[in-house]
Image (tube, rainbow, N blue to C red):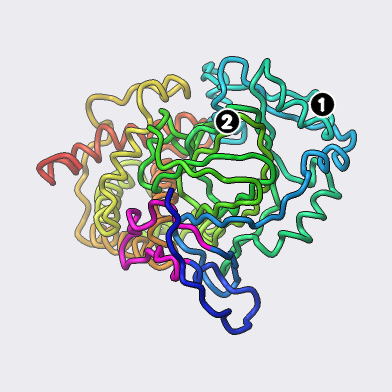
Amino acid sequence: MGKKKVRKQPPPPQRGIWGLVAAAIVAGVWAWSSSRSSDHKCLPVAEVDVVFFSQDYPVPPCPLVVRKVAPPEAWWATLRRLGGDRVVSYDVHAGGTVFTYWDNRSLLAAAALEAGAPRTHERVTATRARMLRDVVQNRSVAARFGGTVEAVAPELAAMFRQRYGHLAPVEPGANVRTPGIWLGGRHTASSPHYDSFHNLHVVLEGPKYVDVWPPTSLDAYPATHPSARQARADFTTGSETELAPGDAIFLPAGWIHRFSAKDAPVLALSLTALPAEFSHFGRWIRSKASMPFWDDAAWTVGRLASTLRVFLPRLARLLEAESALAAHARSYSDDIRKELGIARSPDACPWPDQPLAPRERQRALDAAALVADIFKTRYRPWLRPLYFPPYVENVLTKLNSREGTSPVDAIASGIFFLDACLLPEMMMARGGPL
């Protein structure tokens, strides 16, 4: 990767710690637009000389590499010295070297486990924190560790906060997370994935390698799957960047990336912050405001289905996200349904089309405009693809929200509605594929 030339600028006026925005503008990678991010302007990944973040300015929507953020230090020895005898869990992969994340807290994790969904690795609790380097250096099995620094060594966490806490990728409304630490053995790698948080990933021992792809490139597991946010198939190698010890890469939330090690084990620090969109979505999706067509009158399933036939196509059109609806349905492919215990969609729509009265139809159209306005004003263009599919899925679960309904059945009803009702009707109205 060739380094983009960056013209050095004088420091900005003192208003706290200033944002990466200045460095991003200088690097020529500021990619805002009125409707969507220009991903092509972000690649290849630009290099900048300094990194600053601020509560006053948004982070840039593009990845950035920053060289020599951390001075050389014997971090493996520091980890052994400060790690102590705390018992920690780590991952082992007996059948390969690429680790795919698995989250037992996901909505359909229990169903996936019951159905025997494949996992790439196992979680092992069998070592002390000071022995983590020995674990990842074991050549007989691929191993890695990821967790908070505090869980490994409180003294090390305090050291990191003192030295590098000011580098956390803050912005207006961001929620800074506890620093994380990552260790990986030789030739180990993560599957391509994206994160919900902004990440300044600082390599302490390495080198470490990273491939980056735009947010819209990923054919991912659905959000309800334990492997959500991960690629379902390996990508072709992108523009690989080598990060030497002391180097860092800033990854905005939503950007797809794959970290890997080659001939040496790696140790890295992650300074992360959840964007304001994350907090807003959590509050909004639980409120009536997320479904403004809903009123206090009695709702039948038929009435709701008819309303969604008007509301969702208009919302998708206003957000230029028709293809996102189809992609969401495709994410529940036959193999994924088998892993989650979800049946095939019916051939015919089980919710007959009952035309709405003009007043109710207008209410659904107005509601779509209100929701679209929230997405456009509260969610930055490159982050909308992270939140639109979960929004749609949450709305669709209302088709089967009777007391006692299992999560699998609630999700399945929404998929059936998309597959057998809404998408065919949208394609017929459009005269072609979405």
63 lies above or below 405? below
Residue 119 occupies which quadrant of the picture?
Answer: top right
Where is residue 72 drawn, in percent x and y? 72, 50
SS at circle 1? strand
In x, y percent, where is residue 175? 63, 60
Which portion, as a residue range, is magenta?
24-48
Q: Are marks 2 and 1 in contact (CB under 8 Å)?
A: no
Q: Is residue 35 magenta?
A: yes
In terms of depth relative to the viewer, which is nearer, 87 or 98? 98
CA separation in Å, label 2 and label 1: 24 Å
* Three-letter amino acid code of the residue under disc 1: Thr
Q: Counting residues from the N terminus, which is met first, the one under dot 2 or under dot 1? A: 1
Q: Quadrant of residue 379?
A: bottom left
List the single residue furthest toward the left. Answer: 431
Residue 185, by quadrant, is: top right
128 displayed left or right of 408: right
Residue 47 on the magenta span: yes
User: If the image is split into quadrants, where does the C terminus sit?
Assistant: top left
Q: Which amino acid does label 2 sit on?
A: Lys
Q: Nearer the viewer, mark 2 or mark 1?
A: 2
Left or right of 302 in this view: 218? right
| Residue at figure coordinates x 55%, y 80% from the top left | 10
Q: How crowded is mark 2: few (under 14 residues within 10 Å), some or many (20 or more)?
A: some
Which residue carries the number 2 mark?
Answer: 262
* Relative height, residue 135 to residue 278 (above, below): above
Helix, strand or loop status at disc 2: loop
